[in-house]
Amino acid sequence: MDVKLAAAVAAGKAATYLSRRLGLGAGSNFPGRVVLRLHPRAPEEMSSRLEMGCVLVTGTNGKTTTSNLLAAMLREAGMRPVHNRVGANLISGITAALAQSSDLRGNPRGDIGLFEVDEATLPAAVRRLRPRMVIVTNLFRDQLDRYGELETLARKMDSALRELKPGSAVLLNADDPLVASLGKDSPASLHYYGIESEEAAEGMLPHAADSKHCRECGTPLAFSAHFLGHMGKYSCPSCGASRPRPSFSATRVEPRGAGGTATTVSTPAWEASLLLPIPGLYNVYNLLAAVAGAQLLGIPREEVERGVRGYVTAFGRGERIPVDGRELFLVLSKNPTGFNEVIRTVRGEGEGLVVLAALNDRIADGRDVSWIWDVDFEELAPLPRVLVAAGTRAHDMALRMKYAGLETSRIEVRGKLRGALEAALSHAREGETVYALTTYTATLELRRILTRMGAAPGLWEGGEP
């Protein structure tokens, strides 16, 4: 027995217990730091004992939903994933998930690792965990004060994919020009997923689109169909580079408002009509990534379908939480493209809405909030009868909404999130929905408030192995 590893795992478990017992959080990161301090190679040691290896899910948006969907499919197939399900996606969070799922000897009680990984952490995660599969969802401008430009991040990710072992697999979003360009020099096999339904296409590329130029020659790409942000069907009129043909695709996309999306998914092995219980075209991409990952892991169609039917929404990703006779619709909104897609969903709910918009600028959110000027808030402005602005940058949000055309008489500024939630609920009639659009740390804070109110369980409750 590795005594040093056993001591580190025991200390990590104790840190998790104390963190939760004292109400300090889910214990999803700090225990991992404790383990790493005592045994720097603990993640390598524990992950190497997983019978079926590791799967990593990375990208700007969709990591948590994709990994949670895939986890549901794995469980339906009888597998036992070790999973950082609450979204702690740095090495410390992955280490905490491994330690929490292991016995005191450091042997995981699961058989496959499924880890959401921060984009900038991917190189370290690949080196430490030696994954059998990497899924890349998309790359959008997000926290530029932390990551730098997208091309810089893409080069780092490309370097990480080159370190994969032969026989491993990489799943890439064909509709994202930057993501689809990754992995060309990787020893892993490349697989692509994307949307084929023309009905899902929108008009012109939005001004907030990020990757609009050919990565090979720098020429502006020509889009024959645009789905979301800079994602669509594209080709380069100069060098001829074009969107790869996806092996896994959505051939039908039928939005049903906040109630979800009906879609037909086509794979090399089968085709199925699925009802995804969470709204938004971005979640169709997440579904495709999860289905593709499941099929490459050998999971049959029946288990995939059951996983989708039984999917429980991840916190802050379209959760519906009953509060004081009202319903809170909680959606993480952390960058221009993500926010625009949330607005696209909310727009289907009509006018006269109560909206809570919380904007924080903490480190995990990104200090630079100038990105809110790239969000199409003009599309949101006609909808609220009242918008409560909250968070550390509540006044910035209120100003942005004023310039978007929302009358100041319909804007209420409440910096503290607890007071903002109470104000929004007071504006909503019984049985009505409050739409909470929140940045990352605001989402966590709001969830803690709801837990203290008894309206929602703690993030760690119910389902983590």
Image (cartoon, helix red, strand yellow):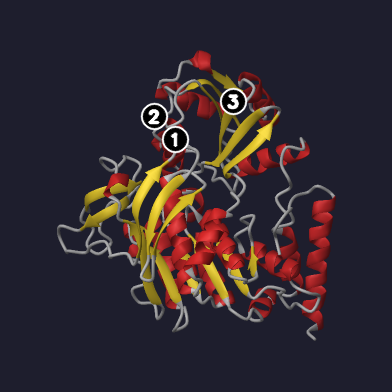
Q: Nearer the viewer, residue 233 or 274?
A: 274
Q: Position of residue 97 (x, y in %)?
A: 69, 65
Q: Quadrant of residue 196?
A: bottom left
Amino acid type of the residue that numbered disc 2 sits on in the rendered structure: Glu
Q: Which class describes the residues within 10 Å of circle 2: few (<14), some (14-19), or many (20+)?
A: some
Amino acid type of the residue that numbered disc 3 sits on in the rendered structure: Glu
Q: Earlier in the sequence, mark 1 or mark 2?
A: 1
Q: Nearer the viewer, mark 3 or mark 2?
A: 3
- Distance of label 1 from label 2 (alpha carbons): 7 Å
Q: What mark, if any, has residue 379 been given in the picture?
A: 2
- 208 sits left or right of 109 in the view: left
Q: Nearer the viewer, residue 23 or 282?
A: 282
Task: Give SS at disc 1.
Answer: helix
Q: Looking at this view, name the residue that lies furthest to the left.
A: 238
Query: Residue at position x 59%, y 22% from top?
Result: 413
- Distance of label 3 from label 2 (alpha carbons): 21 Å
Q: Are marks 1 and 2 in contact (CB under 8 Å)?
A: yes
Amino acid type of the residue that numbered disc 1 sits on in the rendered structure: Ile
- 103 sits left or right of 60 in the view: right
Q: Earlier in the sequence, mark 3 or mark 2?
A: 2
Q: Which class describes the residues within 10 Å of circle 1: few (<14), some (14-19), or many (20+)?
A: many
Q: What mark, if any, has residue 432 been given in the picture?
A: 3
- Distance of label 3 from label 1 (alpha carbons): 18 Å
Where, quadrant-wise, is the N terminus in this rendering? bottom right
Residue bearing the label numbered 1: 343
Where, quadrant-wise, is the C terminus in this rendering? bottom right
Q: Are marks 3 and 1 in contact (CB under 8 Å)?
A: no
